[in-house]
Image (spheres, coloured by chain):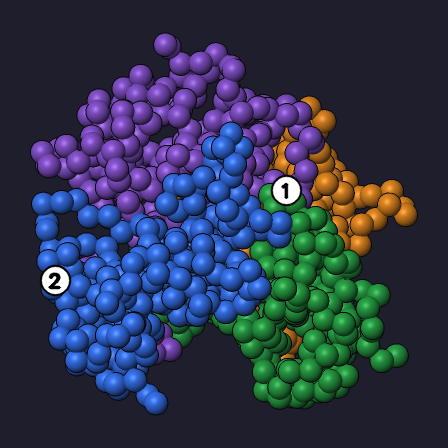
Chain colours: A purple, B green, C blue, D orange
Amino acid sequence: MINKVWDSFASAVADVKDGDSVMIGGFGSSGFPLQLIEALRQHGARDLTVISNNAGVGDEGIASLLKDRLVRKIVCSFPRSAGSVWFERLYEEGAIELELVPQGTLAERIRAAGAGIGGFYTPTGYGTRLAEGKETKVINGRGYVLETALPADVALIKAQRADAWGNLIYNTAGRNFNPPMATAAALTVAEVERVDAVGDLDPECIVTPGIFVDRVVAHGMKGVAE
Amino acid sequence: MINKVWDSFASAVADVKDGDSVMIGGFGSSGFPLQLIEALRQHGARDLTVISNNAGVGDEGIASLLKDRLVRKIVCSFPRSAGSVWFERLYEEGAIELELVPQGTLAERIRAAGAGIGGFYTPTGYGTRLAEGKETKVINGRGYVLETALPADVALIKAQRADAWGNLIYNTAGRNFNPPMATAAALTVAEVERVDAVGDLDPECIVTPGIFVDRVVAHGMKGVAE
Amino acid sequence: MRLKPAEIAERVAQDIPDGAYVNLGIGMPTMVANYVSDDRQVIYQSENGILGVGPAPAPGEEDPDLINAGKQFVTLLPGGAYFDNAESFAMMRGGHLDLAVLGAFQVSEKGDLANWATNNDTYPPAVGGAMDLAVGAKQVFVIMSHTTKSGEPKILESCNYPLTGAAVVKRIYTDLAVLDVTDQGLRVRQLHGDNTFDEVQALTGATLLPALS
Amino acid sequence: MRLKPAEIAERVAQDIPDGAYVNLGIGMPTMVANYVSDDRQVIYQSENGILGVGPAPAPGEEDPDLINAGKQFVTLLPGGAYFDNAESFAMMRGGHLDLAVLGAFQVSEKGDLANWATNNDTYPPAVGGAMDLAVGAKQVFVIMSHTTKSGEPKILESCNYPLTGAAVVKRIYTDLAVLDVTDQGLRVRQLHGDNTFDEVQALTGATLLPALS
């Protein structure tokens, strides 16, 4: 029987290795896999490349990984927010590398990795500093920049409900980067609020089919160490 | 008030011009906008380029457009099926041009057109006859073929339910090419089984948001001439 | 005279057509929604994955996941829909939005937009969805003060801040005037209050064309 | 001795692992599902947009939209999901399927696959999803007769029909034998019945390596 449900956040991230690239879903305060991030922090893998829209605010979530100096590089569109103190401190020290990517290009590069597309031509950023050094092409009179697929070793994502096959549905705007990231990593781990019986999720409304998901951990299961 | 519901199939396709490119959703016997196709046939615009997965079987649907010799060119992945007699006849006569595209490349080129992507590198077809004359690129040791976006003047699609904002949901495998085609044409017309009140479609389950849809015509509305 | 930010937003709102799909940038652009008249139905997109953004929820009614791009709690209108970021930016980049209203640091007479970075390299940059919106929306309106706090022009022959997009802005709404970016150059569309052409020209770093009569 | 098509399908079924995501091509490959033992849970994908394809519906229970890639009516298993063709081929091309079982006109000793066109140019070609599956699935198994109806080898040093994909086939199941495509060349994995290496070699257009003991 296919059963992708794991019994603890800690065990679900225990395979993350030093130097891994880790996608983390979420946007603003919405759709972050906070318990998986905390489990990753406690796991303590170092030299990580984090791929996420933001670079964390305050002391929690992604910021906690930065605070513990586990992150060598961050790939994101909007690192600087009110409260992004750990990112700003490490950036000033030269202790973290930043790859700044326009948000739509970030999402599309992640989708491309999941879809087997090697690269694509986007008009976004054409003629700007963020296209410097990149291949360009004029197609039907319009300028485009070549961007390549962005895969990862691990994706930590957040959904609302799952089943044992790994099918996922989300809550409102909590989707954000989670569905494309689910497709783009060698190992996809989903944090969910609850697990339903196989067949209870409406097949017309499943956003992430289970084929993209390797492990599911639900809130209320054995949590991370306090 | 936004109201995209039109009262007849005939009026909804009356703007199609000679020489237009027309996407038509559907796969096998599933998810075809048969009443819109019949309205288009009666409308009689000529020299059309039809973009669809198949080239029609029997005398109905896409085949009826071929039988009436309204189609100059067809872009598809699988023109030759049991019963594709009109396509085969016209092809033998040299009366129709065929652009054969692998099915996934066809879907991705359509999506790219809707997503503002100028072109993309796919491994599909690399080293085969269908890549001859196309740009190629080796990325991370793997060979890819450059394929360009495929937009259209008009998309005729089929969904199950709509609302007056043009939001669409589909039935089971009836989605096939319909959702990507909805995004890729200057004018998108959806044939649906019924129109619900705005707000009655679950926002978590809407597959095609209304922004992509210009016109909706429901079965049971004033039909095409018998 | 100079309009207050809310008054500029009100002026932009007058030009948003009924039935339009609109993305409002963070900050002053977000205020525009407050002034669109009730006889127009406008559908707002939020880049994090919402079409049909509604007003702020009542206190205690917030859905923690339901925020807009500015991280404010919002609601969904009946008829709205959710989607992921790849789909949201496909929608933006693919030219499906009728209008984006954005803030700016600088705009050039050719419609070049600079709104994501200054020339201060010690400060880490952030770009978000600005570049995608700039190239994707069918029309881009800019809403901003006509000059910097120290009185320097923000409308220039060419931007000296890094570009967000080249030749993307269609119209500029400032506290002094409304300007159209045309093939001939920047043309005054409206002077606010008793402002004269010469007064506005004096605070603009590019040559203006007078309003068409 | 030559296995019947259903017997080859049964042999393939033995090698499909529990929990695998599998796409079965049209025709003989579709028969494989009939022989997967009940103690294995296999999730079948259909390229038109189904994951979790179930058996044929009872007569009168057909959903007219619910067909597989071969246009046969099917059902959906509990736990299945629907998606559009762009997503379906993203799934295929992106390497998410564990296995594709495909028919073939010819296979080369390097694992080149030819299954979409012959050299008859008067007949209009059709490709469908064959090229996407060939490059996308983690493993490609071919199921076919060892020779053409007229007795010509279909396993060759190099294909003379147009390729579907280069170096994509991992294993070949025929009515005579099971062959692995390896870096060293085509290696016999199993000879059916009392077939000898020399008999199979004589009907093969490429040099075979003997089975590893």
Q: Is residue B183 visible?
A: no
Q: Residue B123: image x %, image y %?
A: 42, 57
| Amino acid at the residue labelled 2 | Gly
Q: Quarter of the image holding residue A4?
A: top right
Residue at x-position 24% and y-position 48%: C126
Chain to which the residue tagged by mark 1 belongs: A
Label 2: element kind: loop
Q: Is residue A91 visible?
A: yes
Left or right placement of residue B15 versus residue A186 in this view: right
Left or right placement of residue C195 versus residue B32 in this view: left
| Amino acid at the residue labelled 1 | Cys
Query: Is residue D17 depicted above or below B52 in this figure?
Result: above
Query: Is residue C212 depicted above or below C40 in this figure?
Result: below
Q: Residue A67: image x %, image y %?
A: 21, 25
Label 1: element kind: loop
Neighbours of disc 2 within 10 Å: few (<14), some (14-19), many (20+): few
- In the picture, the quarter occupied by the N terminus of chain D is top right
Residue at x-position 55% and y-position 71%: B185
The residue nearer to you, when weighing B92 against B4, is B4
Disc 2: which residue: C151
Disc 1: which residue: A205
Neighbours of disc 1 within 10 Å: few (<14), some (14-19), many (20+): many
Q: Residue C193 carries which label?
A: none
Residue at x-position 9% and y-position 45%: C122
Chain to which the residue tagged by mark 2 belongs: C
Residue at x-position 15% and y-position 32%: A90
Q: Residue A128: image x %, image y %?
A: 22, 63
Q: How many labels does the image show?
A: 2
